[in-house]
Amino acid sequence: MSDFARFLHADGPHPEHAAALQLYGQFVGDWVAEITAHGPDGTTHTAPGEIHFGWVLEGRAVQDVWMIPRPAGAPAFPIAGNWYGTTLRVYDPSITAWRISWFDPGRSVFRQQIGRPRGPDIVQEGTTDSGDLTRWSFTEITEDSFHWLGEAKPATAPGWRLLVDVRARRRKD
């Protein structure tokens, strides 16, 4: 392993905020997913994908990689486009929440959000450069599965619109 990878990755959560770090730490591992994109006209398209979560930065953060569709190089995923990006999730004790940054350089999509538990779920909220609100939620969380919802609320329209939903299950191999 290169020095970069060795210094980036961590074996587990940092003890200073170990309990709070488990909010996203519970996802550390490898996941297979079924992704459904929802068009504004009611059309849907479903494709397989995969997600990988790991501890980074002395265990003070969780980073993930989302690849949709899988395998890489597959034809363009209708409605949502192909995703090959990473999220850095850093717990910030000064706001008792997570600062979240999503980077998908292939699509030039970059998002900033704040994540918090909301009942049994995790909800991340932010705003796009154009002023649209974003809400990404982890729901139906178990040890081996979760349901992720990507929603947007345009600044000029009422109500939230479901863009993408992901059903993920932990890979067992």
Image: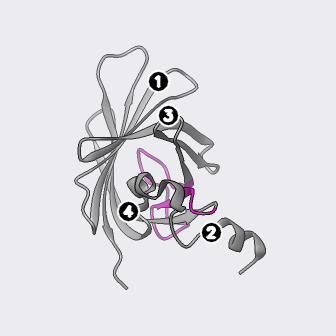
Residue 116 appears in the rendering: yes
Which callout, 4 or 3, points at the residue further toward the start of the chain? 4
Check residue 132 in the rendering and tell me which mark sits there, or answer none: 1
Q: Helix, strand, or loop for circle 1?
A: loop
| Front disc: 1 or 4 | 4
Q: Residue at x 54, y 65 (%)?
A: 55
The answer to whether residue 73 is magenta is yes
Which amino acid type corresponds to the residue marked 4 in the rendered image? Gln
Which amino acid type corresponds to the residue marked 2 in the rendered image? His
Instruction: Report which residue position mark 4 lands on.
Output: 26
Residue 63 appears in the rendering: no
Q: Calculate the distance from the C-alpha at mark 2 to the C-alpha at mark 4.
A: 16 Å
Q: State which region is magenta.
A: 58-86
Q: Calculate the distance from the C-alpha at mark 2 to the C-alpha at mark 3.
A: 25 Å
Q: Quadrant of the N terminus?
A: bottom right
| Front disc: 4 or 3 | 3
Which callout, 2 or 3, points at the residue further toward the start of the chain? 2
Q: Calculate the distance from the C-alpha at mark 1 to the C-alpha at mark 4.
A: 29 Å
Q: Calculate the distance from the C-alpha at mark 2 to the C-alpha at mark 1.
A: 34 Å
Which callout, 3 or 1, points at the residue further toward the start of the chain? 3
Q: Helix, strand, or loop for circle 3?
A: loop
Which amino acid type corresponds to the residue marked 3 in the rendered image? Ile
Check residue 95 in the rendering and tell me which mark sits there, or answer none: 3
Q: Residue at x 33, y 71 (%)?
A: 170
Which amino acid type corresponds to the residue marked 1 in the rendered image? Asp
